Amino acid sequence: MNSLRRLAAAYGVLTSYYGVEGLSRARPEALLAVLRILGAPVERIEDADDALRMRREEAARRLVPPVVTLWEDQPPSAVLTHFEGEGGSARVRVAFEDGSRPDEYVEDVEEVDLETLPITRAHRGLVHRLLALPPIPRGYHRLEVALGARRSESTLVSAPARSYRCETDRARRWGLFAPLYALHSKASLGIGDFSDLARFADLASRHRGSFAATLPFLATFPNEPSPYSPASRMFWNELHVDPRLAPEWKSVRSYASHPDFLAPIEELAREPLVDYREVYALKRSLLETMSREALRVRPGFLEELLRTRPDAVEYARFRSAAERRELPWPSWSEPLPRQDLGDRVFLYHLYGQALAEEQIADVAETAERKGVRLYFDMPLGVHGFGFDTWSRPSLFAKGAEIGAPPDAVFPDGQSWGFPPVVPERSRIEGHRYWRECLAHVMRHAGLLRIDHVMGMHRQFWIPSGFEKRDGVYVRYPAEELHAVASLESHRHRSELVGENLGIVPETVNRALVRHRWRGIYVLQFRLTGNPETPFDPVPADAVASFNTHDTPTFAGFRRCRDLDERVEAELLDRETARELTRERAAAVAALDAHLGVGADVSEISRECLARWIQLLLRSEADLVAINLEDLWLEEEPQNVPGRVDRPNWRRKLRHSLSSLPPEVVAILAGISRTA
C-alpha cells in the first residue's frame, strides 16, 4: 500500500480526504482505476513500484515543466532540472506571444552555464536550478530549453497576481438574478431570448442596480435542459436568439404570422414550463430560412465569425453530423464529411452562432452604457458526447465522471455525468482549452462566476463501475489555472467570482483572496439560531444573496420546501426532517427578531422580505444579488438537485418582465433608495 500511495502522490491523486464523515480513505481498487485512467501502467498493487520508477524517469527527462507561472509581482524565473553530474551549457530560447523575442537576448538562443545557476534542490539524482528569465510581458509565451540531446518546451503564463477589478464603480453594488430561459415578455417565442435579457438588464438599470446575473446559456443539445451540461463551453445556445432583431427577419415575417406557426407559439408561450424540443423545432424552422436569406442580404455577415472563431466551422460540422447520425460521437466510424454553406444544417449552426454573438454583444454594450454589466456563469464540465470532448478527445478522461463525495444532502455522494479534464494533458497544451473557454464567455461578461471553483484545485473522480462514494480526488495545477484566469480577466475587463460553497479546503479560499476573487455568501446557509448573533458576518469580498439556483427561494426556505423535497426523494427520513424543520424555524425566528419582524415564521410578508434584503444591502458585502422571483415570494425552485422527476431548468417566471406586479416594482424602488 505504501508504494501505491507514493504512486498516487506522483500522479496527483489523493489517497484520503476530510468530508462530513470525517477522514475518508480511498479504496485501493478505486486508486488503481483512476491511476490507469491517468496513464499509470498498473493492474495490481504489486505493479506500483515499477510504475513509480517509470513515472520518475519520465519526469526526470523533462528539463522544464510544461507550464511556468510568472506572476508580475515576482522576478521571472523557471526551474531547470538536470541529472546529477550533468554539466555544460543549456540553450535557452524565449518566444513572445506575438512572435518577437526579449530585447535582453542578444542572440535568438542564449547559452547559459549550468554552474552559474543557483541550486534550489538536489534529490534522487536530480538537480533543480533556478533559471532567471528576462522581463516577460503579460501573455502566453514559449520557453525552449535544450541540454545536450534533450529538449523541453514550456508555456510561460505571465499574469497579474490579482485579477481584474473595476475600481471606478460604486463601492457598494447590487443586481438582479434570473435564469435566461425563464424570462419572458409579450414578444417571447416560448423561451427567454436575448431581447428579454436586454429588458432584464434595463430593469436593473432603472432601479440603479449595477448587474444582471443569469445562468449559463452555452450550447446544449435539444434534449438536455440543464445549463450545467453544455455541448460546448466555447459556443452559445442559439435557442435564445431573437429572430426579429435580424435584418433577414422580414424574409420569414409572413410565415411567422401564419396561423400554423402562431398557434403553437402562442400555446408554448402560455405554458408554465419551457418545452425545449418544441421551441427548438419552431425557432429552427425560422432560423434555417433566415440563414439562407442572410447570405443574400448580408453576404459578409459570417466573415467576422469565421475570422475570429475559425473553430466555428468544425463546431457546425460536428453538430450537423451529430444530428444526421443520431448516435453519440464515440460510435462514429467515419470521419466528418466536407460541408459548405449550401448545406442547410451546417449553415444553420454557423448562422446561429453568428447571430447569437451579434445579439449578446449588443445587449452587453447597451447595458454597460446604462451602468449595468452582465454577470455570467461558467459551468464546471461539459456533456460527454458534446463538441468539446469530440474535438479534444485526448484532453478528457475516459472511464470516469466528476462528482462529489457524500454530504449532508446526498449521503451516497453525487455523480454529475461529465468527464474530467486530465490535468497533465491540459498542462502539455498550455491550458489552451481553459483559456478559450474563459475568453469566449468573458468577451461580454462584466462579471463571471466560476461554478465549483474548488475544481481548479482538485476534482472528485468516480471511475466507471464504482459507487459514487468510492470516488477519489485528483489534484489540478491551481496556480497555473489561476494565472490564466487572472490574465483573461484583465484582457476582457471581467471580474471573477468563485462559487466556494460547501466543504471547501481553506487553501481554496486563501487562493481566492490572494488573487482577488470574490467568494459566495448565501444567507440561508449562514443562520446560527443564536438570538445574539443570528447570522455569520458577511465578508467584504463576497457576492451575498439569500439563495442560489440549487437552493429554495426565500419563501420556500421559510416554509421548508426543500426538506419536504428531500423526504419525497428518500434522501431524508421524516423524523430527521421534523428536527431540521424545528431548527430552521428557530434560526429564522432569531433573525426575524433581530430585524424587528413579527415572530410568526409561517407568515411570509413583503415587510419581512424587505428587512432581509436591507440586511444584505447594509452588510459588508461588495455585491448583493437579489433573485427576481423572491420579490413576489415565489415558493417553487428552479432546480431541485437529485430530483430527475422534477421539471428542473424549465419553469418560467410567474410574471412577465413587461407586467411586473406593482408591489414588486415598489420593492425595487425601495432597494434603489437604500442602495
Image (cartoon, rainbow, N blue to C red):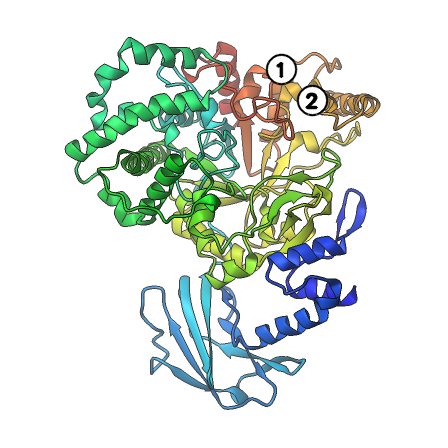
Q: SS for tag 2?
A: helix
At 18% from the left edge and 40% from the top edge, which residue is drawn?
300
Q: Looking at the image, which is closer to me, 387 or 24? A: 387
**Residue 529 position in % (x across, y down):** 78, 28
For marks 1 and 2, give the CA distance. 27 Å
From this view, report whether residue 215 is shown above or below residue 575.
Answer: below
Dot 1 alpha-carbon crowd within 10 angstroms: few under 14, some 14 to 19, many 20 or more:
few
Residue 283: name its quadrant.
top left
Left or right, residue 150 beside residue 104: right
Amino acid type at circle 1 is Glu
Looking at this view, is 536 or 566 the one in front? 566
Is residue 334 shown left or right of residue 20?
left
Q: Quadrant of residue 96?
A: bottom left
Residue corresponding to mark 2: 565
**Label 1: which residue?**
607
**Residue 53 appears at what percent x and percent y?**
66, 74
Quadrant of res 570: top right
